[in-house]
Image: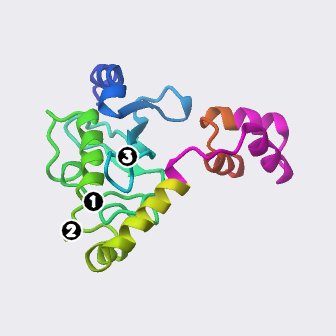
Amino acid sequence: MMDVSRVQKELVECNRDKAISGVCISLADGGTDLSHLRGTIFGPVDTPYEGGIFAIDIRLTSGYPFEPPKMQFITKVWHPNISSQNGAICLDILKDQWSPALTLKTALLSLQALLSAPAPDDPQDAVVAKQYLDEYPTFVSTARYWTEAFAKGSSVSIEEKVQKLVDMGFPEDLVRSTLKSVNNDENLALEKLCS
């Protein structure tokens, strides 16, 4: 049985210093289910991910904290240890090196550190790892481009996003409420509207 009080405590502690740590956690989709969370990490300074805000889907099993959280990037990211296709993460503490002494915050901080220090010799995405090892300048420019394209808030206004989705045939009221529920992320809104 998942330790609900521990998860609630972790949420409070993680979010208390989010401006300093650059990580925070919320309930997924504004819901009430403590086993489905959304983490957010800021791209580390002096990396191609700087200035980006990366969302991570977090699912806790009934065995948490004795079993690791299942984490995967929602935001697309170009990184040797993160799948460019589905956001799967290759990180030892999310697998066999997990310990109940670790927290969701330490896991998110580890992901942030992974953005700073890729391990291309133990890749999740072989194509990205090969580019990192063989064509590093190209890797950096591609990672920067993906950060700009997927991890930074675009300058498109809310009204433009609403109009675009209404033009696709969705009712305006539903579009507005869906955009609001996903923090005005047009891609997530579209996914939700289509599901």
Disc 3 versus disc 2: nearer the observer: 3
- The residue wearing badge 3 is 43
| C-alpha separation, residue under disc 3 versus residue under disc 1 | 18 Å
| C-alpha separation, residue under disc 2 versus residue under disc 1 | 8 Å
Element type at marker 2? Answer: loop
- x and y, in percent, of residue 173 in the image: 82, 33
Which residue occupies 27% across, 23% down?
Answer: 6
Which residue occupies 82% across, 54% down?
Answer: 168
- Which range of residues does the magenta coloring cover? 150-178
- 159 is within the stretch colored magenta: yes
| C-alpha separation, residue under disc 3 versus residue under disc 2 | 21 Å
Disc 1 residue type (three-letter): Cys
Assess disc 1: are there few (<14), some (14-19) or many (≥20) residues with their C-alpha within 10 Å of its C-alpha: many
- The residue wearing badge 2 is 122
Q: Quadrant of the N terminus?
A: top left
Does label 3 or label 1 sit earlier along the sequence? 3
From the viewer's side, name the closer residue of 78 and 11: 78
